[in-house]
Image: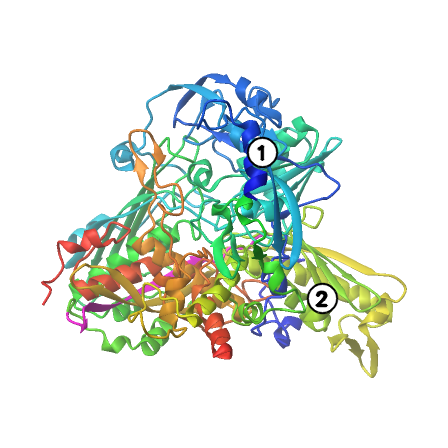
Amino acid sequence: MKFDTPAGTNPIDRLKVVGKATDRIDGPFKTTGTAPYANDWHDPQAKLAYGVVVSAGIAKGRIAAMDLGAAKAAPGVVTVVTAETAGKLGKGKMNTAKLLGGPEIEHYHQAVAVVVAETFEQARAAAALVKVTYTSEKGSFDLSAAMDGATDPGDVQGSPSGTAVGDFAGAFASAPVKLDQRYATPDHAHAMMEPHASVASWDGDKVTVWTSNQMIGWGVRDLALTLDVPKEKVRLVSPFVGGGFGGKLFLRSEALLAALGARAAGRPVKVALTRPQMFNNTTHRPATLQRIRIGATREGTITAIGHESWSGDLAGGGPEASVMQTRLLYAAPNRMTALRLAVLDLPEGNAMRAPGEAPGLMALEIAMDEMAEKLGLDPVRFREINDTQVDPEKPERPFSQRSLVACLHQGAERFGWAKRAAKPGQVRDGRWLVGMGVAAAFRNNMVLKSAARVRLDGNGIVTVETDMTEIGNGSYTIIGQTAAEMMGVTLDKVVVRLGDSDFPVSSGSGGQFGANSSTSGVYAACMKLREAVAGKLGFNSADAVFEDGQVHSGNRVVPLAQAAAGGDLVAEDAIEFGDLDKTHQQSTFGAHFVEVGVDVATAEIRVRRMLAVCASGRILNPKSARSQVIGGMTMGVGAALMEELTVDKTRGYFVNHDLAGYEVPVHADIPHQEVVFLNEVDPMSSPMKAKGVGELGICGVGAAVANAIYNATGVRVRDYPITLDKLLDGMPEAA
Amino acid sequence: MVGASAAATLVAVPSAAGARPAATDAPVLAKVALTVNGERHELELDTRTTLLDAVREHIHLTGAKKGCDHGQCGACTMIVDGRRINSCLTLAVMHQDDAVMTIEGLGKPGDLHPMQAAFIKHDGYQCGFCTPGQICSGIAVLAEIKSGIPSHVSADLNATYEATQNEIRERMSGNICRCGAYSNIVEAMTEVAGRQA
């Protein structure tokens, strides 16, 4: 099905199942330990062996020698695979560094071997016996030092790395009120709870990998490319993903090493990265240095806005596109953005939840707060003044929907924003200095081709199969809801099967495109199944109404199941998107409100209240969508207050590579969180009229926290995370 | 247990007194019997096997998860002799005759423990990977509060404790949820605590 004209009224609009707050249909499995994650795979017939990854102890250089003798002689060892013994390997399209390094080492903890043994304990002990001698080379590990040598990376995923509209320099120079500030965001780790894990098993020349991957189609392609086999010889199975946040978009080393280990061992092999390996072996969100310039009239109309961002990556990698939201968020006739990329020999940078916007808004939305203060304007009002309903670079191009101002107003009302003291450092609650902050949330709505297969059986059960993944985003449930709505059955009559490359290729989960794209694919397949059902029952498919487990047309009513009495009916289709996302800018909007308390003596920061108001198209399942948003808000608190991969600038690696050193929010850090969805449908987006929310939830949160801290204390920190040591010197005198 | 493992150890330890077995030596095996979810399992394990790996890889109950394997995340939480522990931080051979409760022992789809049902109702999870640990910890936390065990945020060591949001958040902070379901988990636990009160 081609989606190239705005959606009219369709069966989803009945909203008998879609749009209702629905308990997750996979909930009974997740809560009882019976949902199978990659590392849980077990076959009593298979003699499973265990692989442990050996990872490089230098950041850049070459392996001079590898002594595998002791490891191979260790008890229980079945095989050891290195780049030297692995056979010819290619590289996946989404990988920058090789997944199995050697002799060249491209980053610290790059995998250099997998040791396979009868038991996990034996493999771990033997892996420690692998002796690697390196020839180190000098690397570049310091972004601020490499900044001056950074270059224009060219187009970034189809968008230019630099933009210019009007006369930014002139307008900024002549603006009566202006801001020119620099901001820094550190490297972030996805730190999903499930370590990268895979079990591989070969049957002749075909390999099946039970894995944990957000994008099954990409994974199959890249494993086939890396193993140098046709992709028909690769099957990935990933029914449950224990968190990804972008860290499992790509084929990673453990899947490759499980496949290589299993081929060498001649039996199934299970490989999981250890937690301390994950931070340097896999990808991360790159640090950014950003400069923002805003010029405005004294009344608060922005006349010039400029945003530049510097980040680093391995040679051949890409930039963190932190300026993209600034092209679209606020009106101004004179504008510029620029991305610059430095070569760094740190581990590979790549997408993490809301790549670009998350760190970009952490800077831009502090800048807006600073500018509002300079202008003597309320920060909500300042954003309202500079709202735009069209793409500011191409005014002929409207937003399909844009309710930023409504989000800000409704949020301000609900949060009690009117009680905020404009002057910082004024509000006390016992030992706490209390402040409120606001930030706009913005994330583009991407759509990707997505296919599904639906089957109706003689019992009236509808089974959906698609390689879409469940990463916590609620895919099982919204896909089930979509099929139930389309076929006119209750949710308990739908079976959803996901995450298997034997199923039609979906959008996968990422970039908050998954919910809208994958349910649209199910919609397309269900439209075909409805035609097949109508044909079987002798109805005109255009007139047939699917409702209450029956098909109605005129005076005739037939049970749906009857259409499959003579055998299952199967339909498969894909949704393909035309150019509505080109003619109309499709984005999601929100407003985050945060209240913090800062201990007047110690500068300890506690988040006291959080509210998000989101406008994001039709919300398919308000229950799981709300969870997506509070999850983003929680990760946003982490980015604001604690998350930072600390770079060893001499040896070139992330030092704090475990969950004790890389702190993420825990229960005690997070208050009750409120989320409001505006009632929005977007017919430009898809037949579902939905958009994503999974990344919108994190966008702007960090700045809202930072602005609240400023409002509480009067200390402006522009270098994340905002830890108490950065506040102490500027704190008001403890009274 | 002491007898069995000591005997096995003596066989493997080199003659030099106090020397640790080298990694190249044959693994030291020991017999251990665990009662997991009411069922007795007699195992012969490499003494380096953690309780978590014994239950996951040898008994094939994979509900408890390995999120970090060194006590930093809580995904492996089990209830052993009535107390929650990080099962990755304890060796299986230390648990001879212990009663181990895992997520699978609490309830099944269609026959859920009230805490499992409350997690579903309040959407106290997203990806589900930390969920078995959160639920085991959640049940144990309410029992700790009931039995008068104080926490860091308990103001009065001699008072009785209530399952306030503050107490729940403090006591649950060893169970990380990167998806960020904390707000919903606290609601689920509060509801279960209310039922118990």
| Residue identified by numbered label 1 | B8
For the magenta stretch, what is the residue range? A426-449
Where residue A219 sits in the image (x, y, percent)? 60, 41
Residue at the outermost bottom position: A555
Given residues A295 and A499, the one toward you in this image is A499
Residue A687 located within the stretch drawn in magenta = no
Where residue B57 sits in the image (x, y, percent)? 62, 44
Q: Is residue A93 visible to us here?
A: no
Measured along the vertical axis of the image, is residue A109 above or below residue B157? Answer: above
User: Regarding mark 1 in the picture, which secondary structure is present there?
Assistant: helix
Residue at the (64%, 28%) spot, across then down: A228
Task: State left or right for residue A554 relative to residue A657.
Answer: right
Residue at the outermost front position: B3
Q: Chain of mark 2?
A: A
Measured along the vertical axis of the image, is residue A241 above or below residue A82? Answer: below
Q: Residues within 10 Å of mark 2 (few under 14, many from 20)?
A: many
